[in-house]
Image: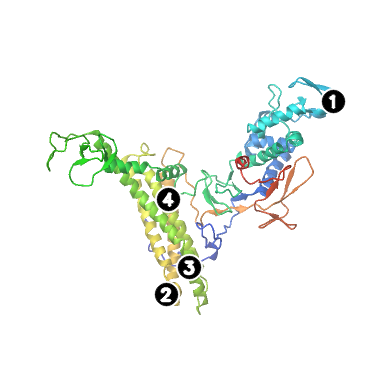
Amino acid sequence: MEDYAASSDDEYRYSDPEDSVDAFDNDDNDYQLVSSKGPSTQVITKESLLAAQKEDLRRVMDMLSVREQHARTLLIFHRWDVEKLFAVYVDRGKHFLFSEAGVTVDEHRDSNSSAAPSTIMCEICIEDVPSDETTKMDCGHCFCNGCWTEHFIVKINEGQSKRIRCMAHKCYSICDEAVVRTLLSKKHPDMAEKYERFLLESYIEDNKRVKWCPSTPHCGNAIRVEDDELCEVECSCGLQFCFSCLSEAHSPCSCLMWELWAKKCRDESETVNWITVHTKPCPKCHKPVEKNGGCNLVSCICGQAFCWLCGGATGREHTWSSIAGHSCGRYKEQEKTAERAKRDLYRYMHYHNRYKAHTDSFKLESKLKETIQEKIAVSEEKDSTLRDYSWVNNGLSRLFRSRRVLSYSYAFAFYMFGDELFKEEMTEAQREIKQNLFEDQQQQLEANVEKLSKILEEPFETFEDDKVMEIRMQIINLTTIIDKLCQKMYECIENDLLGSLHIGVHNIAPYKSKGIEKASELSVCWTNEANNTGVTAELDRPSGSGSSDDSGCSSRKRARKEGLGGAFFDLNLPAEFVDRN
């Protein structure tokens, strides 16, 4: 295995100020790295949500020559996967594509409009109503506006607002959203607002590439990934999370491993293990009793005396070697169970203590940021030839990232080399070989991280230039060494450990040398236009970062006023938040 401790200065020299990133302190953007490639994750606010929908809708409308409501119905059915929609269109044809999604393109509402009778019998309420109080859908079925409205309200309350079917028997056509919007707005504007909201949020709720930011309280943003869905992202609100499971960023743990580990650390299972190992139940009241002396005859607070070795009730007559009328030396199954519980507890404590130690170190080292900035300010005021101190920020950022990798690597090792998940996947010999391989890399990474932490705490602002240059080269070398070690650890996990298993549910987010990428905001401005498509998103002007004015539009959350009542709600929040309030 390579020895990264002996590396030349020239090989690992890297002091690019672009690389000074603080990937784990979400409140400070002074060290944010900017990748040379375009952003692979984007923050979707209310404004950019409209624009993102319009972009996909326009592609389908241009390709299939359909109206916007039909394009939206097709996209909702295919979960906003445009490529899948086009694949079905090429393989199965336009007729199959439309019929499968419930889209009817024949305009029955405009046919024979001059010959329409003055009254029409509604087949739902069995009443004759004026023809101008009826509505015919694209499928050709015509019912009174009252029945249509009640049908829409029922479906919206049932959560089927994104795909409301025609009321006719065995008709699977989807109702025109413009008709739904018009009829609901006349008597039930609140339901029309809710319907609009569900249509808008379908781009997030039904899209596998877009998910709500799991921040609490909710920041109102959604995140869209362009490439791999198995990644870790940072929202503009500062929260870093796993896009796959929406929990905190946890690589190199898989999502299942982190779910199990978080539950194990949170619940009382290990407390139960401790009680099993260190106490015995009283044979009379069954309360746990802890032994506090050397004698094997113990007494419970209820007054019952019992043998500590076997747990059986006894009298109080005893000597140092035996208890009167009692003998126990035979093997019992509960002793085997206790030994197993003790072994599992000690193993858990080994990994948990190291996991928590690195987590605590990360929290303490986070306070170094202000201290280091003060040191840099003092150093820059000195009459020194050294003016560039970006290497300090680079080293601090690398320290934060590597601390978190180390912390989660112990949770990974607990399940990778335990019996909970992969007992049948590896023999004991294979398990030992893989564990040694992983722990060797883990120890190398741990040793270099501790060196970097120690050097960063040096009072370099008081040193001479020669000593500062020496510290500079040490930090630059350690920064690159740690980066390479982290990369090799991830490669070992992906190829040698998880890659050799037959279980495909354990995948990890890829390692990124520059830390978790911060999602860029999709800058758009939107306006209301008097047309049948409602709100239109425009991409002509960039979004501002503050409140809206005449020169731009805000990328922050906005409150939208309801049609009646003057109440406000935020379109960025999920529907259940608004319904609850």
Looking at the rendering, which quadrant does residue 531 occupy? Answer: top right
Q: What's the mark number on residue 467?
A: 2
The residues tagged by marks 1 and 4 sit, at their Cα atoms, a distance apart of 69 Å
Q: Amino acid at mark 2?
A: Lys
Q: Secondary structure at mark 2?
A: helix
Q: Nearer the viewer, mark 1 or mark 3?
A: 3
* Mark closer to the chain start, 1 or 4: 1
Residue 256 locus on image (x, y percent): 45, 41
- Residue at the disc numbered 4: 408
Determine whether label 2 and label 1 are within 8 Å by CB. Answer: no
Badge 3 crowding class, 10 Å Cα cut-off, few under 14, some 14 to 19, many 20 or more, is many
Q: Secondary structure at mark 1?
A: loop
- Residue at the disc numbered 3: 372
Q: Is residue 352 left or right of residue 173?
A: left
The residues tagged by marks 2 and 1 sit, at their Cα atoms, a distance apart of 92 Å
* Residue 401 appears anywhere in the view: yes
Q: Amino acid at mark 3?
A: Ile
* Mark closer to the chain start, 1 or 3: 1
Determine whether label 1 and label 4 are within 8 Å by CB. Answer: no
Q: Is residue 275 left or right of residue 16?
A: left
Determine whether label 3 and label 2 are within 8 Å by CB. Answer: no
* Mark closer to the chain start, 4 or 3: 3
Q: Nearer the viewer, mark 4 or mark 3?
A: 3
Please tell me which residue is depicted at 33% across the width and 49% down the height of the picture: 350
- Residue at the disc numbered 1: 112
Q: Secondary structure at mark 3?
A: helix
Q: Quadrant of the C terminus?
A: top right
Looking at the rendering, which quadrant does residue 406 occupy? Answer: bottom left
Q: Nearer the viewer, mark 3 or mark 2?
A: 3
